[in-house]
Image: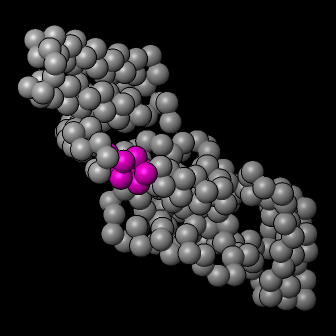
């Protein structure tokens, strides 16, 4: 998350909005309007300085050479500034609602993603050993990275492993990884959270959900194979 440029743009935009709200605040009803006018300039300068500190601090954590620069960063900054400005101006209506909504969104994703595993950089999502393959039945030990091994069996000549992959837009900076996965062979029904996610996938540009499948075939018994997911090619490979 700290390597995501949006993580730094977000607080910079909030402090920019705070500075603008200070600068636009009325001083007519203040006891000392002249002093209040000077104070709002001081607070504006302080908030803008903090915003610049966040943007400058990103240089030490974000690899700017890997960033594909686009107007999306500017649009994100302007959107956060605009919404935050309204929140500061109308603290007890819009502002409070924004804080509660954002907290609920972060809480929902953090709870939902507890069942998912961050996709590793190398793409290896698990390993398996073929234990037996006789009399039209396949048995295997499958270990998804980050979870305990499970024993599976299936009828026929192959055993099918099913996976789901969630990919997030980097603008969802509060999520620690861009991609998560889980094996769905043992999922019996969709939870309410899955229904919400599926709705967001259909209606939003911020996340996508894909399903992948791979066959465990008649390979060498007891030999450990790696299951590798290539997101770019949208395919799962078996590597020995």
Residue 120 x/y as whole percent: 62, 45
Instruction: Please state if 185 lies on the left or on the right of 18 as rendered.
Output: right
Instruction: Please state if 48 lies on the left or on the right of 50 as rendered.
Output: left
Quarter of the picture holding the C terminus: bottom right
Instruction: Please state if 209 lies on the left or on the right of 111 as rendered.
Output: left
Residue in the picture at 48% in, 68% down: 197
Residue 105 x/y as whole percent: 46, 55
Q: Is residue 191 visible?
A: yes
Q: Is residue 225 visible?
A: no
Q: 84 or 140: which is nearer to us?
A: 84
Can residue 90 be found in the magenta stretch?
Answer: no
Q: Magenta: predominant secondary structure element?
A: helix
What residue span does the magenta drawing correspond to? 95-102
Using the image, determine if residue 169 lies above or below residue 200: above
Res 148 → quadrant: bottom right
* Colour setup of the view: one colour
Residue in the picture at 54% in, 61% down: 165
Can residue 100 be found in the magenta stretch?
Answer: yes
Res 77 → quadrant: top left
Residue 155 x/y as whole percent: 80, 88
Instruction: Please state if 213 lies on the left or on the right of 41 as rendered.
Output: right
Residue 203 x/y as whole percent: 33, 69
Using the image, determine if residue 123 lies above or below residue 15: below
């Amino acid at each position: 998350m700290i390597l995501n440029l949006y993580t730094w743009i977000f607080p910079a935009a909030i402090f920019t909005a705070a500075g603008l709200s200070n600068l636009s605040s009325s001083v007519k009803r203040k006891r000392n309007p002249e002093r209040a006018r000077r104070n709002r300039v001081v607070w504006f300068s302080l908030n803008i300085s903090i915003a610049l500190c966040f943007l400058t601090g990103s240089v030490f954590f974000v690899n700017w050479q890997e960033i594909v620069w686009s107007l999306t960063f500017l649009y994100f900054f302007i959107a956060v500034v605009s919404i935050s400005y309204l929140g500061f101006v109308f603290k007890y209506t819009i502002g409070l609602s924004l804080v509660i909504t954002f907290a609920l969104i972060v809480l929902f994703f953090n709870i939902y993603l507890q069942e998912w595993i961050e996709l590793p950089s190398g793409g290896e999502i698990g390993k398996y050993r073929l234990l037996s393959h006789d009399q039209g039945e396949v048995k295997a030990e499958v270990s998804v990275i980050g979870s305990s091994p499970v024993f599976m069996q299936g009828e026929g000549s192959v055993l099918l492993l099913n996976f789901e992959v969630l990919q997030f837009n980097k603008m969802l900076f509060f999520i620690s990884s861009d991609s998560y996965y889980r094996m769905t062979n043992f999922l019996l029904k969709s939870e309410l959270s899955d229904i919400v996610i599926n709705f967001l996938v259909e209606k939003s540009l911020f996340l996508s959900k894909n399903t992948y499948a791979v066959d465990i075939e008649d390979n060498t018994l007891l030999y450990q194979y790696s299951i590798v997911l290539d997101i770019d090619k949208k395919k799962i490979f078996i590597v020995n």
